[in-house]
C-alpha cells in the first residue's frame, strides 16, 4: 500500500516468519534495532498503516576485534513493489578480492522455485518454502543478473558483495544492493553525482546491462555533457569509467530498449595498494523521478563515519532543494539545471527528507564513508539512493538478515517515520 498520511507508527519486525520486536515510533523519529540471528525474509511493517521508511545497515571488519572498516546501507523494498523478477546490472564472481552472492527469499504463502540467470545463462533453480531464504555464489562474471520465479510469485532478491585488498584474507568492506523489480526497468536512469577524479582513493565506475531482446546504443551524460555512447547486444553488460566529477548522471538507451544501471565505487585508505571498500547503488529509473526523497537516518557525529547528502537538479529550470533531518531544516540550496552538490551536517537523526517544489525533478542519495578509528583515511564506502516520497509504504522487505557474525559483521535495521 502506498501511504501519504503521517502519525505515530507501531512497527513490527518479522524475520523468517517470526516476530522479533514491536516498536512505537512518533512522527519524525528514527530508530536502530539489532538481532543476534541469521534469517530471512525480513518484513518491517507499520501495524496501524502509518507510512514508514526502512533500510539495512551493515558494518564490516577484517578481524574479530578493533574498529569497523566497511559500511553498507541498502534501502528495503516497499511491499507495493514486490515482483516475481528482479534485475541487477552485473555479477563479478571471478575477482579474488571480491565476493559476490545472490540473496533471495520467498515472501509468498506457497513454495516457489527461484531461478538465477547471468548474461542469459541459467545458473541454478532453487525451491524455497514460504518465509524461506537462501544465498548462492557463482564463479562467473557477466550480466545482467536476473532472479525470477513464476508469474504472480512474490519474491525478493539482492546482490551481496564483500571486498578485500588482496586475494586472500578476511574482508574489509561490504555492499548490498536490492534488485530492481523487472516491472520497473526503464530506458533511462539517473544518479546524483559521479566522483571520478579521485583515483588515489576512489575507483568509480558505471555498470549497465541490456535486459531487452533488441540491440541498443547506451549514452552516458554527466552534468548535461555526453561522455560516451556504447553499442550493446541483448543480455550483455558493460562497465565504464570517467576521470571527472559531476552530476547528475543520465544513462539512456536510444531506441526505447530496456536497460538497468548502477554506480559502483571501490575505496582504499592509501594512495597505493589494494582496494578495501565496495559500494554499489542502483540508479533511479526515470519514471520514478520525484520532487521529494526520504532516507531513514543520518549520522554526522560519529568520528569514524562520514555522511553526506548528494542532490541534483535534473529539471530544465533552477530549483531550490531543501534538506530536513527529523524535524530540523538543515538548509536550502538553489541548483541550476543539470547541476549537483553535496552537503555534510554535524547532526544525528532521521528521517532525511530531500525535497523541492511540487512538480520539480530532482534526485538524491546518502553517501557514507567508514574508517576504523576517528582519524585517518577511510577504508569503506556506501551510497544509497533515496526512496521517492510517492512510494512510501507501511511495509518493507529485505531478503536476509545476518546477525550471527558479531566478530566480523555488525548488522542493524534503520526505521523512521517521515
Image (tube, helix red, strand yellow):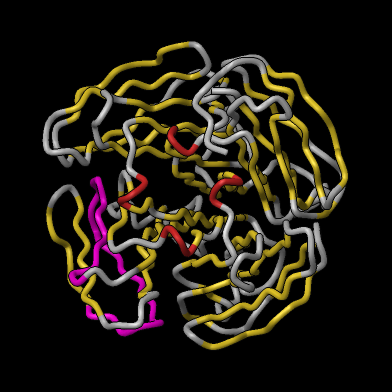
Question: Which one is in front, 347 or 288?
Answer: 288
Q: Residue at x 51, y 41 (%)?
A: 369
Instruction: Tell whether position 246 is magenta.
Output: yes
Residue depicted at x 32% and y 44%:
192
Furthest residue in direction top, as rendered = 328
**Does 128 appear in magenta?**
no
68, above or below 172, in the image: above
Q: Is residue 211 above or below residue 24?
A: below
Q: Is any atom of residue 73 visible in this view?
A: no
- Depth order, front residue of 16/3: 3
The segment highlighted magenta reads 231-255
Residue 416: percent from the left, percent from the top? 61, 26
Q: Residue at x 35, y 26 (%)?
A: 355
**Which residue occupies the foreground of this view, 409 or 35?**
35
Please state the horizontal and vertical placement of residue 255, each as a whole percent of the image: 19, 72
Query: Percent x, y for residue 277?
Result: 54, 55
Amino acid at each position: 500500500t502506498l501511504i501519504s498520511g503521517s502519525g505515530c507508527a507501531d512497527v513490527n519486525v518479522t524475520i523468517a516468519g517470526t516476530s522479533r520486536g514491536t516498536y512505537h515510533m512518533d512522527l519524525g523519529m528514527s530508530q536502530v534495532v539489532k538481532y543476534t540471528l541469521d534469517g530471512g525474509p525480513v518484513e518491517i511493517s507499520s501495524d496501524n498503516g502509518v507510512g514508514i521508511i526502512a533500510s539495512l545497515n551493515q558494518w564490516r571488519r577484517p578481524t574479530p576485534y578493533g574498529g569497523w572498516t566497511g559500511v553498507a546501507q541498502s534501502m528495503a523494498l516497499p511491499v507495493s513493489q514486490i515482483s516475481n523478477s528482479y534485475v541487477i546490472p552485473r555479477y563479478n564472481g571471478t575477482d579474488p578480492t571480491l565476493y559476490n552472492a545472490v540473496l533471495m527469499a520467498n515472501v509468498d504463502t506457497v513454495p516457489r522455485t527461484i531461478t538465477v540467470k547471468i548474461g542469459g545463462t541459467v545458473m541454478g533453480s532453487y525451491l524455497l518454502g514460504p518465509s524461506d531464504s537462501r544465498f548462492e555464489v557463482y564463479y562467473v562474471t557477466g550480466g545482467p543478473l536476473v532472479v525470477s520465479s513464476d508469474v504472480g510469485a512474490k519474491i525478493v532478491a539482492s546482490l551481496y558483495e564483500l571486498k578485500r585488498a588482496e586475494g586472500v584474507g578476511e574482508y574489509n568492506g561490504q555492499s548490498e544492493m536490492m534488485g530492481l523489480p523487472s516491472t520497473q526497468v526503464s530506458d533511462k536512469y539517473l544518479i546524483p553525482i559521479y566522483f571520478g577524479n579521485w583515483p588515489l582513493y576512489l575507483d568509480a565506475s558505471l555498470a549497465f546491462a541490456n535486459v531487452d531482446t533488441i540491440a541498443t546504443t547506451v549514452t552516458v551524460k554527466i552534468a548535461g555533457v555526453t561522455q560516451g555512447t556504447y553499442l550493446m547486444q541483448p543480455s550483455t553488460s558493460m562497465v565504464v569509467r570517467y576521470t571527472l566529477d559531476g552530476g547528475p548522471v543520465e544513462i539512456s538507451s536510444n531506441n526505447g530498449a530496456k536497460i538497468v544501471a548502477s554506480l559502483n565505487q571501490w575505496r582504499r585508505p592509501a594512495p597505493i595498494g589494494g582496494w578495501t571498500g565496495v559500494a554499489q547503488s542502483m540508479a533511479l529509473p526515470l519514471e520514478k523521478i520525484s520532487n521529494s526523497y526520504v532516507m531513514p537516518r543520518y549520522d554526522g557525529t560519529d568520528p569514524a563515519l562520514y555522511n553526506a547528502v548528494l542532490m541534483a537538479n535534473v529539471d530544465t529550470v533552477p530549483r531550490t532543494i531543501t534538506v530536513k533531518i527529523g524535524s530540523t531544516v538543515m538548509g536550502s540550496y538553489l541548483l541550476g539545471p543539470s547541476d549537483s552538490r553535496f552537503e555534510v551536517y554535524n547532526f544525528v537523526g532521521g528521517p532525511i527528507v530531500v525535497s523541492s517544489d511540487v512538480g520539480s525533478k530532482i534526485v538524491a542519495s546518502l553517501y557514507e564513508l567508514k574508517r576504523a578509528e576517528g582519524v585517518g583515511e577511510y577504508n569503506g564506502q556506501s551510497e544509497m539512493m533515496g526512496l521517492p516520497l510517492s512510494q512510501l509504504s507501511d511495509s518493507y522487505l529485505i531478503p536476509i538478515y545476518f546477525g550471527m557474525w558479531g566478530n566480523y559483521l555488525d548488522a542493524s535495521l534503520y526505521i523512521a517515520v517521515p
